[in-house]
Amino acid sequence: MKILAVSTSGKSASVAIYIDGKISEIIDRSGKTHSETIAVITKEILNNNSLSANDIDAFAVDVGPGSFTGVRIGVAFINALAFATGKKIYSVSSLEALMMNCKENKSICSLIDARNANGYGALFECGEETIEPTAVVVEKFLYKIPENTVFVGDGAEKYSDLINDMVKNSTISDDNELSAKGVVEYAVKYKKELLDEVKPMYLKPSQAERMKVK
């Protein structure tokens, strides 16, 4: 089984290939836009593995939440590849992908910073989602989180002091980077449904939409 996964909703665009249990990954930290890099690093990782897009059995993509522009880029890119090759897609949220950074078999809270004390959060218990992905006010959200929880994501880093004050015996993951490796790991371990087309996960209106309402 060969799965190609991309993640573009975070700071760095990344692509990973899963081949019969082994994963290789490229993360672009050049500072260039995701639209400039995602096709380039996808071609690079395919070449590194002596593959073409047609050799891939299925695709996987991080559908958000995260950067609105980034999410659209990744989703559109993978939808196009799937259409061109006649293959199907695993839809994985960025919060699900982040959970895979933690190997502890306990409560894991994925938390992404959305600025101004806001974020995107979800809670998982032994891999099962107990609080679904949602847009949150971080302090209010933390009241829902049980003690002994591991936090992961850039929101975990940014709000680490608040987390330690509010959630007893909490810990912050050592690996808080969102990447395609987590996307394909989650797809392989937990996802069963393959889709012809995926849609972005937007948990709140974009800035442009909020400005229009005002």
Image (cartoon, grey):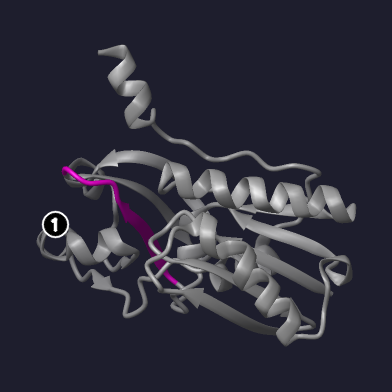
In the image, residue 47 above or below residue 206: below
Asked whether residue 131 appears in the rendered view, the answer is: no
Q: Is residue 6 one of those drawn in magenta? A: no
- Chief secondary structure of the magenta portion: strand
- Spot the residue most to the top: 213
Callout 1 secondary element: helix
**Callout 1: few (<14), some (14-19), or many (20+) C-alpha neighbours within 10 Å?**
some
Q: Magenta segment, which residues?
A: 106-116
**54 or 59: which is nearer to us?**
54
Residue 166 at x, y percent in the picture: 14, 57
Residue 89 at x, y percent in the picture: 75, 53
Q: In this view, does 73 lie to the left or right of 144?
A: right
Question: Which quadrant: the C terminus?
Answer: top left
Q: Residue at x 17, y 59 (%)?
A: 159
Q: Residue at x 53, y 40 (%)?
A: 201
Q: Name the quadrant containing residue 189.
A: bottom right
Asked whether residue 190 appears in the rendered view, the answer is: yes
**157 or 48: which is nearer to us?**
48
Q: Residue at x 76, y 85 (%)?
A: 49
**Amino acid beneath label 1:** Met
Residue 51 at x, y percent in the picture: 82, 79
Q: Name the quadrant containing residue 72.
A: top right
In the image, residue 49 above or below residue 73: below
Query: Which residue is labeled 1 in the image?
Result: 166
Residue 18 at x, y percent in the picture: 72, 77
Q: Which residue is drawn at 53% across and 55% down?
A: 35
